[in-house]
Every structure is written in C-alpha cells, then in structure tokens.
Image (cartoon, rainbow, N blue to C red):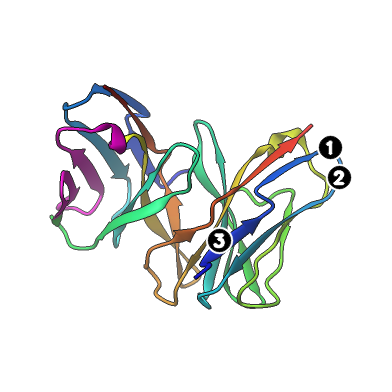
Amino acid sequence: GQQVMQIPQYQHVQEGEDFTTYCNSSTTLSNIQWYKQRPGGHPVFLIQLVKSGEVKKQKRLTFQFGEAKKNSSLHITATQTTDVGTYFCAGPKETGGSYIPTFGRGTSLIVHP
Amino acid sequence: DAGITQSPRYKITETGRQVTLMCHQTWSHSYMFWYRQDLGHGLRLIYYSAAADITDKGEVPDGYVVSRSKTENFPLTLESATRSQTSVYFCASRSTSRTGELFFGEGSRLTVL
C-alpha cells in the first residue's frame, strides 16, 4: 500500500482563496518531495524538504516538513487559475539500498474564477 | 535538449496483444522508473532500475516486463494486455543521487479494448 497518505483528494476554491494539502506517513521520512501535475501533463518537481521543521517558500507556495518528519503540507496563498492541477507528495521507501519515491494519491485543486 | 521522451504517446490495442512502451533519456541518469496513473490511485510504481542490467519490482509489477540493456533506455512491455492495464504510463529518471528529484516523460496513454 501507499507509504504516504495525502488529503484531501479534491479541493474546490474560489480564485483568491487559500489552499492547503497535507501529506502524512506512519514512518519517519528522510525527506519529502512535492510535485505538480497540470491537467493533461506530467508531474513536475517543485521542492524537496529534508530537515525537521523545515519551511520553504516559492512565491505564493509554502512548504512545511513536520518536526517528527512524518508529515508535510503545501499551502498556496491567494490561489490563481494557473494553480489548477494535482499536487503530489512523495516519500522515499528504502529498498535494497535504493531510495524509491512513493507517491501519495494527490490532491486535485480546482480554482473557480 | 530532449531530456526524457516516451513513445508512443497514445496507443490503442486489444486484449491479449503485446505492447511495448519506450522510454529514452539523454542525461545518463542511473535510475529509471515506470509508474502508472489511474484515477483515484495516484502514481503507482511498476518497475524501477538502478543501473543498466539491474531492474526490480515496484508496487504493481504483475503483467509487465522491463529490461535495461543500455543506460538510456528502459522499455516496458505488456506481454498480454488486459483491460485493467488501460492507464497513463509515466517514465521517470533520476541522477545518481539517492534522493534527487525525478524527471518525468510526457506519458503514454494506453487503451486496451
């Protein structure tokens, strides 16, 4: 099964409202990555968090990694129609010395103008 | 700068036929991955490869075969396609870093009738 759980599955917002998606793991993660997939497109890397309690910002996007390194969140301030897409978190699963990215099921963001 | 390319982008086939999806990357990345994406399931790992001639199963490997005779190529074969294999398939690559970002191809949409 999935190593990381992501909620919500869908989120409808009015343009200008904020949006948050959450990623939770039952085990401690060495790092967590976030990806964005536009409708009809492919996932594109956004950021990687490594440190406990780490917070990183990219313009209107704020990424957090929990103190226990078991959860993470992505917050978008004042959403725009260009933010539409599915946001995935991915945690590494160690297998035979390799770290294999395991994805959450994603949160689809729908922005209504 | 082609990066990572997949072919074909779209494929319609019939149950029982063999289908091969191609993936080619120009970066000489060590790691390559095949994911399938289905509504409600996010991205699920089929197979991955840490280097040429080294492949390993992911979460949903049944019905699929891979090979990696050259670093740059990682074909995925459905030996006898079934309707449940109708999906969008993404190939991805990663450098030698154990935890680096994934670079995804544009995807191959497969329909099995």
Within 10 Å of disc 2 (Cα), the crowding (few <14, some 14-19, many 20+) is few
Element type where label 3 sits in the image = strand
The residue tagged 1 is: B14
Question: Given the image, on which type of amino acid does mark 1 rest?
Answer: Glu
Q: Which residues are magenta?
A: A56-83
Q: Are marks 2 and 1 in contact (CB under 8 Å)?
A: yes
* Between B21 and A33, the one nearer to me in the picture: B21
User: Residue B70: image x %, image y %?
Assistant: 67, 78
- Alpha-carbon span between mark 3 and mark 1: 25 Å
Question: Given the image, on which type of amino acid does mark 2 rest?
Answer: Arg
- Using the image, determine if residue B46 lies above or below residue A108: below
User: Residue B37: image x %, image y %?
Assistant: 55, 41
Q: Quadrant of the C terminus of chain B?
A: top right
The label on residue B33 is 3
Question: Given the image, on which type of amino acid does mark 3 rest?
Answer: Phe
Q: Are marks 3 and 2 on the same chain?
A: yes
